[in-house]
Image (cartoon, helix red, strand yellow):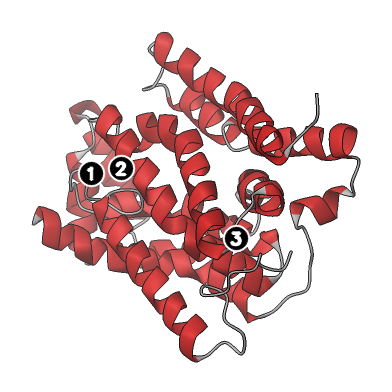
Amino acid sequence: MKLTQPRLVAAFFLLAVLGGWTPLVLLVANGLTEHRGFSASAYYWHMFPPLLAALLLTGPVLKVPVREALGITFGFNRFWGLAWLTPALLLLVGLGFCWLLSGVEPIHTVEQYIAFKRAGVPPDQLELFETNLREHPPGHPLWLIVRGLPASVTINLLPALALEAGFRGFLFREMPGGFWARSLRIGALSGLYMAPAAIFHFADTPVLGAAVLFAFCVVLSPSLVYLRVRAGSVMAVALFWSMLITLTRTALDLAGGAPSLYRPFFGLGGILAVLLLLAALSAHDRYVAPQRLMTERARPAR
C-alpha cells in the first residue's frame, strides 16, 4: 500500500492516540484521577507519544534524518526568547480576562495568597500550615512566575519537546497547505489529542472542558506555527510549552478560585489572551517582518 501524505498523517495521529490516551483511559476507569502520583505520571507520559510516533515513522518508514524531519535545530534568534517568555504574558492577560468573565479577582497580594492557600488546608493540618507560614513566609504572588523560569528550561523542557516534535515538528513537515490551512489542521489534531487531558485541567466539568481545551489548541496553533517558522526550529515552541506547563499551577493559584472554564491557560480567559497574541503576531507579520508569512500562499520554509 502506497504511503500517501494523508495516510502518513493518519498513521502518526493514530499511533500518538494509542500511546497517549491509553493511560488516561485507565486512570479514569480505575477512579485514580484524584491520586496525585498516578495523575502526574499519566499527564507527563501523555506528552511523549507524539515524539515516539514521529520517530517510528521518520526512521524505519520514511528513512530520513530525524533532526531534519522533526525540525530540531539550534540557530538561536530573538524569537526563541519571545516564545519562551510569552506564556508569562499570556498568564497575566488571561487573569485579567478571567476576572472580567467570572467576577473573581485574581490574587495579587501576599494577604490574598495566604488566605487562598489557608482555605484549602484540611482542619487537621491547619496548625502545621500556620507553623510553616511563620517559618517560611511567602513572597509576592507574582514571584511565582519568576520562580518558574528554571523549571521551564530543565525538567519540563523534555516533555514539551516530545509534544512539539510531533505536532509542530513532524506534522509541520508532512501537513499540506499554506500557513493558515496547515496551522489549523495541526491545531485540530493537537486539540483532539490533548482533549482527554481535560480531566486534569477541568476536573469539575471534564466534558465541556475537553471542548474548551480543543478550542484553545486550535486558536493557539497559528501563533505556534508562526514562532516555529520565525525561530527556524521546533525548539522555540518547545520552550513555549515548557514555560506554559511550568506556570499551569501558578495560573491555578493566581486565579483565586475562579471556575476552571474561565481560568488561564486553557479556559476562556486563556483563549482570549491567545487571540490577542495572534493579533500581535499578525501585526508583526504585516508591518515589521521583511517577508510576510501569514499571507503567503506557498508552504512556509522548513
Pointer 2 residue: 212
Badge 2 amino acid: Val
* SS at badge 1: loop
Asked if marks 3 and 2 touch (Cβ < 8 Å), the reply is no
Outermost residue, left direction? 103
Mark number displayed over residue 237? 3
Earlier residue among tags 3 and 2: 2
> Which amino acid does the dot numbered 3 rest on?
Val
Q: CA distance from mark 3 to mark 2?
A: 21 Å
Real-space CA distance between mark 1 and mark 2, rounded to the nearest whole angstrom: 8 Å
Relative image position of residue 69 (x, y in whole percent): 80, 51
For marks 3 and 1 on the same chain, the one whose residue lies earlier in the sequence: 3
Is any part of residue 139 visible from this angle?
no
Q: Earlier in the sequence, mark 1 or mark 2?
A: 2
Query: Are the two marked residues, 3 and 1, in contact with CB atoms closer than 8 angstroms?
Result: no
Find disc 1 in the rendering and name its residue.
261
At horizontal 56% and vertical 64% (from top left) the residue drawn is: 179
